[in-house]
Each structure stands twice: as structure tokens, then as C-alpha cells.
């Protein structure tokens, strides 16, 4: 009888209402311990993690072959190692520190919203995704994300986008079925934590990620100590994740600022907001430049390898080629600029729309528009970024050349 009543209640409650309730609970989570079993996924068999929200995240990956991989995220750094070996460390701080000095600092200084927590405050974000192969010549995918920005449990946001999902439940579980993609996502009803994702390929092959155990807000785990590590550059995929995280957090910060715009005006904070806006756009442009440099360098190197040149020959001429690449990248930047500027202008329009949507009644959209438009000269920002990019272009070329060693 209880199961029947629960199923009827779930059907009566809308999908968005369910997700709203689970996201509210997820925000109370400070510590996570979880272990997942991965079935019929190439290479990976087990994933385990421990985290202290906003401080550190440690996860391990077991593969069918080779030793267990350890990963630790702490103080804007990513450490990676296996037992008994020298590790590597990547530094993300240059790509995030500006956010702390921008809108987040304005919110804290002006005490916007009183005790309301700033969306820019560090918090653990965790995501898992799985898709089967939709056709013989198409790929399936497995995605694991953890970091310090974004939704606490990212699968809740993913499910919100699944407008065709069928929602049901039994006992302590909530089940979302997506028939069009032969996919089922099951959550724990009391916490919103992921219980499982099950998919089928076009030919019926079953694949799954299943939580074997989890504890939320339990006894703090002991943080591991990484071995000696050598510095490694941030990968292109990681830079894309950084950009996505920054844009999401930036949008959340703007929403909070606009909700309390009357306080911003009363506390003479409009100039500080404009300055923070200009800083964020400038730093996102710098991040875009970094991503574009990696894309161009990878393309240039792969093109030469595909033509039959050996990696050893490219390595031998790397210094000279890096200089030539810098000149090529500068020319390409001018070709890219019109598209980037259009995207920037569309972003400005979006910010102004968000202001109209979120700002208190009586706020002046025309004054805000004038403030926004006077805050930043994108032409000058772009010129400064690329005028000083020659040295970085050569470094990126070298990094991508090392990445291409196994091609």
C-alpha cells in the first residue's frame, strides 16, 4: 500500500517540483563519500570519491588494466598519480582567481542579500553521465565531472532538460525513464543522490553506472597526500570545463547582484559592478584565447603529421615552428574577431534581459544599459590580449606537440 501511495504521489508531483525539492536538499551536502561500479564500459570498472565541500576532492579510478589512478583537487590545483610513481600537477588558479576578485568580492563587500550565500563561494559539484551507442557508426559516452563550481549534483540539472522523461518511483527511489534513448536514471528519494544510470546500445548491449555505497555529511575522510609531482599544462578539455564553470557561476552571481540592485545603488556600488563586469568579460576573452591557441596548435601539428612528417622531425624544429605558429595564430585571431564580437554583443543583450527580469521594481534598465555599455572596450581588450600573445603561442605549440607524441 505504501509503495502504491508513493507511486501515485510521484505521478501527481511535477518533474520540476521533484527536482526543485532534491536540489534544495543537495545544497545542504558538505561531505560526500561514494563508490560506483561501472559495467560494460571500456577501460573503467570502478570510481570512488571523498570530498570536503569547497576544500578538496579526492577520487580514484580503477581500470581493467593498470594501477589505480588517484586524483586530488585542492587550492585550485589538480594532482594525479599512481602508487609508487611521480605524479603530475596542473594549476587552475590563473583561470579562476579573477572570479574571486570580481563580482563575488562586490557581493561580499556590499553584503548583498544579507546572510544569503554567494553563488561564487566554493562548493563541491559532482556530475555523472552515460549514453549508449545510438547506431553502429556512432559513439556512446561516459562523463564524470567534479569541481568547485556548478550544481552540487549535476545530474539533477541534466534531468531538468529531459522534457520527455517519464517519472515514477518505488520505495526509496525516484526513476526517470527516457525511452527514446533506452536510458533510465534512478535517484535516492531522500537525498537526490545518483543510484544508477542504465543505457542500451542500438543492438541491445546494456551498460550502467551503479552506486554501491554512499554517505552524505558523514565523518570527514582523511585527505591523501600526493607524492612528488611535476607540473603539467591544463588540457583543452579541462579549459573547456573551466569556461563552462565560469560562465555558469558568473550567471548565478549576476542574478544575485540584480535581485539586490536597489542595495547596489543605495550603497554606491554601481561602479564596482561595472568594473567587475569588465574584468570578467576580459578574463573570459583571455580564456577563449587560450582555448583557441590550443585548438589551432593541435590542428597545425596534426595536419603535418597526416602529411607524413614524423613527430621527431617536428620536435627538432619546435622552437622555429613555435615562432611561426605565433604569427599564424595572430592572423587567425583577426579572422575570428568578428564572430567573437557578435557573441559578446549577444551576451550583453542577455545580461540586460537578465537585469530586466531580476532587478526590483523601479530599477532603471536604461541607466543599467548605459553603465554596461560604458564599462568595456572589447576592441582594446582583444588587441592587448593578442599583442602580448607571441610567447604564450610558442608555449602552447610546445604543449600540443608533446600531446601529439602518441599520434
Image: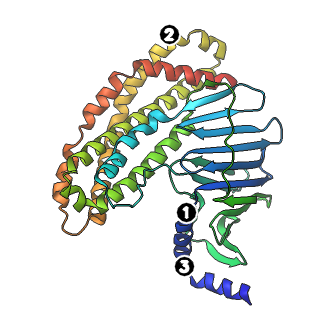
Residue at mark 1: 28
Residue at mark 3: 14
**184 sits to left or right of 242:** right
In percent of width and height, residue 13 lies at 56, 81
Mark 3 nearby-residue class (10 Å; few <14, some 14–19, many ≥20): few
Mark 2 nearby-residue class (10 Å; few <14, some 14–19, many ≥20): few
Mark toward the start of the polypeptide (3 vs 1): 3
Residue 361 numbered mark, or none: none
Along the viewing direction, whichever of 102 and 358 lies nearer the viewer: 102
Q: Can residue 67 be seen in the rendering of this structure?
A: yes
Residue at mark 2: 320
User: Cα distance, mark 3 to mark 1?
Assistant: 22 Å
Please name the residue shown 66% across and 13% down the image: 312
In percent of width and height, residue 230 lies at 63, 23
Q: Secondary structure at mark 3?
A: loop
Q: Nearer the viewer, mark 3 or mark 1?
A: 1
Determine whether label 1 and label 2 are within 8 Å by CB: no
Q: Quadrant of residue 111?
A: bottom left
Along the viewing direction, whichever of 260 and 95 lies nearer the viewer: 260
Amino acid at each position: 500500500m505504501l509503495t502504491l501511495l508513493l507511486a501515485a504521489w510521484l505521478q501527481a508531483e511535477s518533474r520540476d517540483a521533484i527536482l526543485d525539492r532534491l536540489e534544495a536538499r543537495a545544497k545542504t551536502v558538505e561531505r560526500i563519500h561514494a563508490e560506483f561500479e561501472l559495467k560494460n564500459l571500456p577501460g573503467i570498472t570502478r570510481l570512488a570519491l571523498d570530498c570536503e565541500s569547497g576544500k578538496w576532492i579526492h577520487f580514484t579510478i580503477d581500470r581493467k588494466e593498470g594501477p589505480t589512478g588517484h586524483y586530488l583537487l585542492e587550492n585550485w590545483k589538480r594532482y594525479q598519480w599512481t602508487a609508487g610513481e611521480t605524479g603530475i600537477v596542473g594549476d587552475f588558479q590563473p583561470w579562476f582567481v579573477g572570479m574571486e576578485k570580481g563580482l563575488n568580492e562586490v557581493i561580499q563587500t556590499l553584503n548583498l542579500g544579507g546572510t544569503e550565500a554567494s553563488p561564487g563561494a566554493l562548493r563541491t559539484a559532482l556530475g555523472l553521465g552515460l549514453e549508449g551507442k545510438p547506431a553502429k557508426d556512432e559513439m556512446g559516452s561516459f562523463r564524470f565531472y567534479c569541481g568547485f563550481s556548478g550544481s552540487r549534483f549535476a545530474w539533477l540539472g541534466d534531468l531538468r532538460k529531459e522534457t520527455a522523461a517519464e517519472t515514477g518511483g518505488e520505495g526509496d527511489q525516484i526513476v526517470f525513464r527516457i525511452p527514446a534513448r533506452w536510458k533510465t536514471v534512478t535517484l535516492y528519494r531522500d537525498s537526490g543522490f545518483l543510484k544508477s544510470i542504465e543505457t542500451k546500445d542500438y543492438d541491445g548491449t546494456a551498460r550502467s553506472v551503479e552506486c554501491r555505497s554512499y554517505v552524505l555529511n558523514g565523518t570527514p575522510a582523511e585527505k591523501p597526500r600526493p607524492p612528488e609531482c611535476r607540473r603539467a599544462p591544463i588540457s583543452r578539455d579541462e579549459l573547456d570545463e573551466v569556461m563552462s564553470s565560469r560562465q555558469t557561476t558568473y550567471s548565478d552571481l549576476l542574478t544575485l547582484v540584480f535581485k539586490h540592485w536597489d542595495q547596489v545603488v543605495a550603497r554606491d556600488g554601481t561602479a564596482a559592478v561595472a568594473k567587475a563586469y569588465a574584468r570578467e568579460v576580459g578574463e573570459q576573452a583571455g580564456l577563449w584565447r587560450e582555448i583557441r591557441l590550443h585548438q589551432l596548435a593541435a590542428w597545425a601539428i596534426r595536419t603535418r603529421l597526416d602529411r607524413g612528417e614524423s613527430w621527431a622531425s617536428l620536435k627538432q624544429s619546435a622552437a622555429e615552428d613555435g615562432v611561426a605558429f605565433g604569427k599564424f595564430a595572430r592572423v587567425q585571431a583577426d579572422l575570428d574577431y568578428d564572430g567573437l564580437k557578435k557573441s559578446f554583443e549577444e551576451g550583453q543583450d542577455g545580461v540586460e534581459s537578465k537585469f530586466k527580469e531580476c532587478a526590483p521594481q523601479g530599477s532603471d534598465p536604461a541607466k543599467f544599459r548605459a553603465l554596461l555599455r560604458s564599462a568595456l572596450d572589447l576592441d582594446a581588450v582583444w588587441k592587448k590580449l593578442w599583442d602580448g600573445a607571441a610567447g604564450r603561442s610558442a608555449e602552447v605549440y610546445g604543449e600540443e606537440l608533446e600531446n601529439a607524441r602518441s599520434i
